[in-house]
Amino acid sequence: SKEGYSHFMLKEIHEQPMALRNTLAGIERDEVTKIGAELADARHIFITASGTSLHAGLIGDYLLTTVAGADVHTFTSSEYRKYMKTAGEGDVAIVVSQSGETIDALLALRALKSAGVKVIAISNVMDSAIPRESHLAIYTRTGPEIGVAATKTFTAQLMVLTILAMSAAAARGYVNDDEAAYFMNEMEQVPDVVQATLANNEAKIKRVAASISRASSMYYLGRGLGLPISMEGALKMKEVAYIHAEAYPAGESKHGPIALVEKSFPVLFTIFNDEYGEAMEGNIMEMKARDAYAIGVIPKSLEERLDKVLDIAIPIGVEEPAIATIAYSVPMQLLAYYTAVARGLDPDKPRNLAKTVTVE
Ligand code: M6R
């Protein structure tokens, strides 16, 4: 039942603090240490998934590459054939699938497995095909996700992948015991941060949704970890609000996409407290010079500074970027949801979409 919420999507967005708590409680520390060591030793790491799960995979890729120094190749499962000559013994693959039944991911898994790759599944459905056929499975524990748009399973996937990346970094000696303990402590705060993000921003996001609801097109721009989070935000907007939303690396926006920007064109910037802040600020100014409507999901520490250049600032109360990705996803979900509602659409029944894609 929707338990008083008007849609499953909204209910599931609000279930995230609980879903994240349960996921964290279900993660076995010994198992994570073991997998971290395997990832650290792997020749290549392949991450494969589709849609939202692919975006979670791209966050895993960024962290495994930058924090753990791993050689990671992430691809949409339907394109797995490209990687078959480079995959083999000594490699590890992570297959991410909420349902555990997506045919593209399943076919990629089978191909990687027969090439001799060790396969780890991340899924929300116990004993579904993908975890069953993998060598090892880790579960997100969000409870069933009914809404076609993935929400709580995405943030739970981010949590699992981030913890695995940190464990690989620890196994390689890039993170010491104190740093690892600090990181896990921060992760334990995430459900509360998500709760606060919901409580502090929902009313504001509803207003933003009303003002973008007549747009036919918009951009989501980010750098680093901000890119997969932008891609996921744009996918949500397309799926439920049917607005043509494109995500770009903010640095690419000048190489073509900016040609579309005119008065009131919505551009959503995802900015973390990281080395990309200044470049992102420059990108906001470029868009403002074309009269774009600039929305920023930003760290609290930059609020005073960026409030001056943005039309709308959505400050998030967590500074560590690797952890903040989870909380940053929440305003993106709410924005897509409330924009769909403002456009008179039913976010639980997006046209042309099935919850699980079982044909190639
Ligand atoms: O069940 P899976 O995680 O394998 O599903 C993958 C995609 O089909 C899925 O994430 C899809 O993109 C969602 N509708 C996104 O909201």
Image (tube, helix red, strand yellow):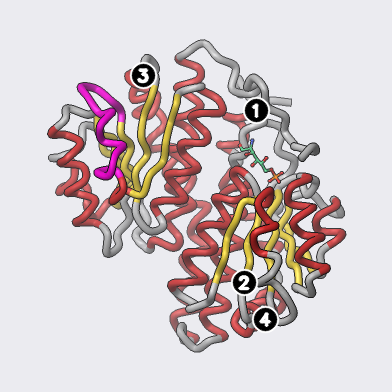
Q: Nearer the viewer, residue 255 or 295?
A: 255
Q: Is residue 225 above or below residue 257?
A: below
Say which residue appears at 49% left-offset and 56% top-offset. Answer: 190
Q: Nearer the viewer, residue 238 or 147?
A: 238
Q: Could you give the CA–CA distance between mark 2 and mark 4, rounded to whole angstroms?
A: 10 Å
Taking the image as shown, residue 274 lies to the left or right of residue 341, namely left
Q: Amino acid at mark 1?
A: Phe
- The reply to whether the magenta stretch includes residue 198 is no
Task: Assign a secondary structure to mark 4.
Answer: helix
Say which residue appears at 71% left-offset and 50% top-offset. Answer: 97
Give the image location of residue 45, x and y in percent: 62, 71
Front disc: 2 or 4 = 2
Q: Which numbered disc flags the more N-terminal residue, 3 or 2?
A: 2
Q: Could you give the CA–CA distance between mark 2 and mark 1, rounded to whole angstroms?
A: 35 Å
Task: Assign a secondary structure to mark 2.
Answer: strand
Mark 2: C-beta under 8 Å from nearest atom of ligand 1:
no
Taking the image as shown, residue 349 lies to the left or right of residue 135, namely left
Range shown magenta: 253-266
Q: Amino acid at mark 4?
A: Glu
Q: Which numbered disc flags the more N-terminal residue, 1 or 4?
A: 1
Q: Amino acid at mark 3?
A: Ala
Q: Could you give the CA–CA distance between mark 1 and mark 4, rounded to whole angstroms?
A: 38 Å
Q: Which numbered disc flags the more N-terminal residue, 3 or 1?
A: 1
Front disc: 2 or 1 = 2
Say which residue appears at 58% left-offset and 60% top-offset. Answer: 74
Q: Could you give the CA–CA distance between mark 3 and mark 2, rounded to whole angstroms?
A: 40 Å
Q: Which residue is mark 4?
A: 38
Q: Which residue is mark 1?
A: 8
Give the quarter of the figure containing the C terminus: top right
Residues tagged 3 and 1 counted as in contact (Cβ below 8 A): no
